[in-house]
């Protein structure tokens, strides 16, 4: 509340410079990556119903991993935004397979070095991916930040 009793919301401007690209044709899915050629990728998957730039820590995180020589990547999955409840971990895994395949091709002829990070329910995607994904040989580190299991909370 301000001095006059009115509610004031502070809007925090968040922006990153980079490239928005498609990595899957059916369904057509897009991802964001910071600029610069790289064979080193830091792939962030957010939590339940989140999409691009949902968390305020993302711009400083992208800056920090950039200084370490990594390209920051954030995909939009079918389960992003309002897609919760109509997707599955298996489907997210297939979509992450498509994303990592795209990154492997971008890195060629170099062998990619991929660090993955999940936030909240995004952690489930990476745990599932590490068990079932096709490109796990390129993943050198996995970060599970504030892991939660909301996706199957309503399961019988």
Image (cartoon, helix red, strand yellow):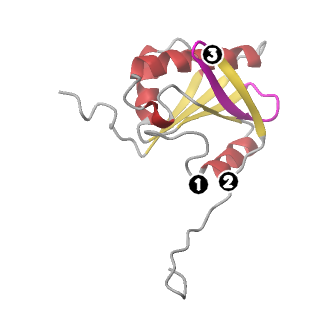
Which residue extends farthest right? 36
* Precedes in sequence: disc 1 or disc 3: 3
Q: From the top left corner, tell me how far across and down residue 132 is, in percent.
A: 43, 14
Name the residue located 62 percent from the left edge and 48 percent from the top edge. 58
- Label disc, if present, on residue 24 of the rendered structure: 3
Asked which quadrant contains residue 48, the reply is top left
Q: What range of the chain is rendered magenta?
A: 25-39
Q: Is residue 87 left or right of residue 72?
A: left
Q: Are marks 2 and 1 in contact (CB under 8 Å)?
A: yes
Q: From the top left corner, tell me how far across and down residue 2 is, in percent.
A: 54, 82
Question: Which residue bears the numbered disc 2?
Answer: 14
| CA distance separating discs 2 and 1 | 7 Å
- Give whichever of 72, 79 is nearer the camera: 79
Q: Check disc 3: other Cα within 10 Å, few if <14, some if 14-19, many if 20+.
A: some
| CA distance separating discs 2 and 3 | 26 Å
The quarter of the rendered structure image containing the C terminus is: top left
Name the residue located 71 percent from the left edge and 16 percent from the top edge. 111
Element type where label 1 sits in the image: loop
Question: Which residue bears the numbered disc 1?
Answer: 56
Q: Is residue 11 left or right of residue 86?
A: right
Callout in the foreground (1, 3) = 3
* Precedes in sequence: disc 2 or disc 3: 2
Element type where label 2 sits in the image: loop
Query: Is residue 35 rendered magenta in the image?
Result: yes
């Amino acid at each position: 509340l301000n001095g006059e009793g009115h509610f004031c919301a502070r809007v925090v401007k968040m922006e990153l410079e980079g490239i928005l690209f498609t990595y899957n044709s059916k369904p057509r899915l897009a991802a964001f990556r910071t600029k610069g050629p790289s064979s080193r990728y830091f792939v962030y998957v957010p939590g339940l119903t989140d999409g691009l730039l949902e968390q305020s820590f993302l711009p400083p995180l992208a800056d920090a991993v950039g200084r370490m020589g990594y390209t920051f990547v954030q995909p939009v999955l079918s389960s992003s935004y309002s897609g919760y409840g109509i997707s599955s971990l298996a489907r997210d895994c297939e979509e992450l397979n498509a994303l990592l395949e795209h990154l492997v091709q971008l890195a060629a002829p170099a062998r990619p070095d991929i660090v993955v990070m999940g936030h909240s329910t995004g952690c489930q995607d990476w745990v599932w991916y590490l068990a079932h994904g096709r490109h796990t040989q390129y993943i050198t580190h996995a970060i599970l930040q504030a892991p939660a299991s909301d996706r199957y909370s309503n399961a019988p």
